[in-house]
Image (cartoon, grey):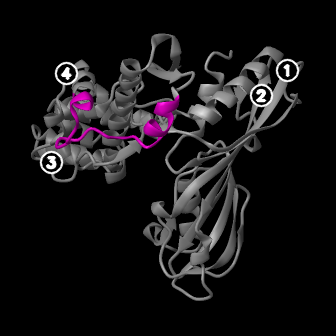
Amino acid sequence: MKLRQLPEDFIVEEVISLPQIFSSGQYPTYLLEKKNITTLDAVEIISRIWKKKKPEIGFCGLKDKHAYAKQYLSIRNGPKKNLELHAFSLKYLGERNRQLEIGDLRKNRFRITIRDLRREETKRLEQRADEVEKFGFPNYFDYQRFGSARPSGEFVARYLLKKDYETALKYILASSSKYETKIKKKISKTIAGHWGKWKELMDLIPKSSERSIINYLKDHPENFKTAFELIERRLRFLIVTSYQSYLWNEIVKLYLKKNLEENNLIPAHYQIERFNFDLLFYQFLPEERIKQWQDLSFPLPVHNLELNKELKEIYEEVLAREGLTLEDFKLRGMEKTYFPKDERKTIIIPEELKILEIGNDNLNRNRLAVKISFSLPSGSYATILIKRLTYDFQ
């Protein structure tokens, strides 16, 4: 089974409330069509070309680099014209009286091609699509959410919660992944080889965000807690929310185990670098649970949750595996770093799930390709739905 062999194999289109576009307003609005570039990289280029600060550019969500995406942008006092570049284009639509933001996104519409399938796999995929259309699937965060996990599989936020601030900081400054730039890898290797020798490091690494933190440690060599808060805000947010998301997945898995028969559960294992990513799906739901679970939301772990007895026991059991309690999520003495409150639907039933076409795969000899379409609410992962359909495909 192969996914995203071409950008056009994974098409995503935002559905937003467009009637808010008017003939006048401070926020010109555009349709962004892109491939082989992330939303944030496109925003960076737009800000340079049109000389706009990045906070003046609003959007509803982040779209993957390896996809063909249609999404919407607003730019405060932006130019009323189109923009055509190699990796993306902007089409001017009109003006709004406020900036676009996350809450404006109603859903995402997907059209996905799954390639390199055997005939028997297409039959299984059709059957599973019928199951998902009726019973939905667990609304897990997918591995993209865990980008701040280290290549070793460690979550930095786990060390924050255990008050081991030096180890947390060391994972950020002195380790890197294969996806990072050569310069970042070189800086990380240098810091790892000279950890604790802050004055020496000031002469060894170039001007960078890492060097600014080293400069602080040169004068405050034991204050790793404050030094951690010098990490760029967006990265700190990813560090805490990725761990919350991992724990939320584990909570949902345990909830399924405690509420469904074992022969109804489908384990699925994935490995990304050294990060083990285990999911648990179900084949069907009893009639009385479909509506009940579709309306059920679980909060992400924070320190002051109010939970019923069943959920409290599940949260405590998951956290106990990590050597933690909910009270640990209060990061005392840290002013800029915190675990945000949020909750998430436990299961999702996709809208308009259809198999559009099954035919010969023109990229993989003697194999078949399946084109499928569906819509999901904001924040749900199409790749989790695909995993549910193909969990045992090679």
Q: Which residue is mark 1?
A: 367
Question: Of the residues tagged 2 and 3, which is closer to the observer?
Answer: 2
- Asked whether residue 47 is in view, the answer is yes
Q: Earlier in the sequence, mark 3 or mark 4?
A: 4
Residue drawn where x is 71% and y is 24% of the image? 127
Q: Earlier in the sequence, mark 4 or mark 2?
A: 2
Q: Earlier in the sequence, mark 3 or mark 1?
A: 3
> Hey, what amino acid is under mark 4?
Gly
Label 4 with label 2: CB-CB less than 8 Å? no
Q: Which residue is mark 2?
A: 115
Which element type, helix, strand or loop, lies under badge 1? loop
Residue lying at the far top in this picture: please name it.
Answer: 263
Residue 287 on image: x %, y %: 52, 30
Compared to residue 31, the image places residue 359 above or below, namely above
> Hey, what amino acid is under mark 2?
Arg
Which element type, helix, strand or loop, lies under badge 3? loop
Q: Which residue is mark 4?
A: 323
> Hey, what amino acid is under mark 3?
Met
> Hey, what amino acid is under mark 1?
Arg
